[in-house]
Image: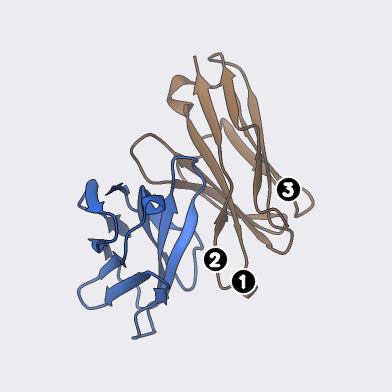
Amino acid sequence: AQTVTQSQPEMSVQEAETVTLSCTYDTSESDYYLFWYKQPPSRQMILVIRQEAYKQQNATENRFSVNFQKAAKSFSLKISDSQLGDAAMYFCAWRPTGGSEKLVFGKGMKLTVNP
Amino acid sequence: DTGVSQDPRHKITKRGQNVTFRCDPISEHNRLYWYRQTLGQGPEFLTYFQNEAQLEKSRLLSDRFSAERPKGSFSTLEIQRTEQGDSAMYLCASSSPSFLWTYTFGSGTRLTVV
């Protein structure tokens, strides 16, 4: 069964600094998508960034970038210039390119941003 | 389009009662997904629809749970004979291949069974 592991339940970062959130996954599929979602206290899950496994180039969205290591099955999220609004639960998720369309989520990680 | 809407936001019910939740997806999205999230956990997949067809159901979806999407637009999730273990946040999401699989989530319905 496919699993997504976020081994750090909580992290904190100082405002304006950089933080990296880790995620590993286990799958025998060769083609898949990976996602990072943010869930602020208001509850709505918001897509942060998305990566297709066939793309070697790491995805980037403004202050958010990923380090995708396919052989190591690792998908970490780097947040640069952290802002108070980045404080939230962050979830890593996976789904295969074909077949089932369900997202498999990790347990999440709580990020605190200190002023 | 205002995104994915879920109603109600909160529901408190007595054990044994039936409850129904509604989800209105983004109109251009033909896929609709239901997830359940308990405290301190990531969302767990329950079921999903492509238009009105229910294509996959999780083993988590016991016989007491049923979901419909009758006209391929909004969806309902019904839980019959609720149990305390059903207390959770129920999330709805929509997506579409033409939107590069950017799953958009609603704010959820928090169910408390007392």
Q: Quadrant of residue A57?
A: bottom left
In which chain is the residue bearing label 1? Answer: B
In which chain is the residue bearing label 3? Answer: B
Q: How far separated are the C-alphas under marks 2 and 3?
A: 18 Å
Image coordinates of residue A105 in percent, x first then y, are: 38, 54
Task: Tell me what hue chain B is rendered in.
Answer: brown
Q: Residues within 10 Å of mark 1 (few under 14, many from 20)?
A: few
User: Three-letter amino acid code at disc 2?
Assistant: Thr
Q: Earlier in the sequence, mark 2 or mark 3?
A: 3
Q: Is residue A54 above or below residue A89?
A: below
Q: Residues within 10 Å of mark 2 (few under 14, many from 20)?
A: some
Residue A1 visible in the displayed image: no
Kindly state the secondary structure of the residue where label 2 is placed.
Answer: loop
Image coordinates of residue B25 in percent, x first then y, are: 68, 53
Image coordinates of residue B77 in percent, x first then y, are: 63, 38
Q: Is label 3 in contact with label 1 (beta carbons under 8 Å)?
A: no
Q: Could you say which chain is coloured blue in the image? A: A
From the viewer's perspective, is A22 left or right of B44? left
Residue tagged by mark 2? B102
Q: Is label 2 in contact with label 1 (beta carbons under 8 Å)?
A: yes
Q: Work out whether residue B113 or residue A62 is closer to the camera in this orientation and state it.
A: A62
Q: How far separated are the C-alphas under marks 2 and 1?
A: 6 Å
Indicate which disc residue B99 carries: 1
User: Three-letter amino acid code at disc 1?
Assistant: Phe
User: Three-letter amino acid code at disc 3?
Assistant: Phe
Q: Is residue B82 above or below residue B4?
A: above
Q: Are marks 2 and 1 on the same chain?
A: yes
Q: How far separated are the C-alphas under marks 3 and 1?
A: 18 Å
Tell me what residue is drawn at x 30 percent, y 57 percent: A3
Residue tagged by mark 3? B74
Q: Are marks 2 and 3 on the same chain?
A: yes
Q: Quadrant of residue A91?
A: bottom left
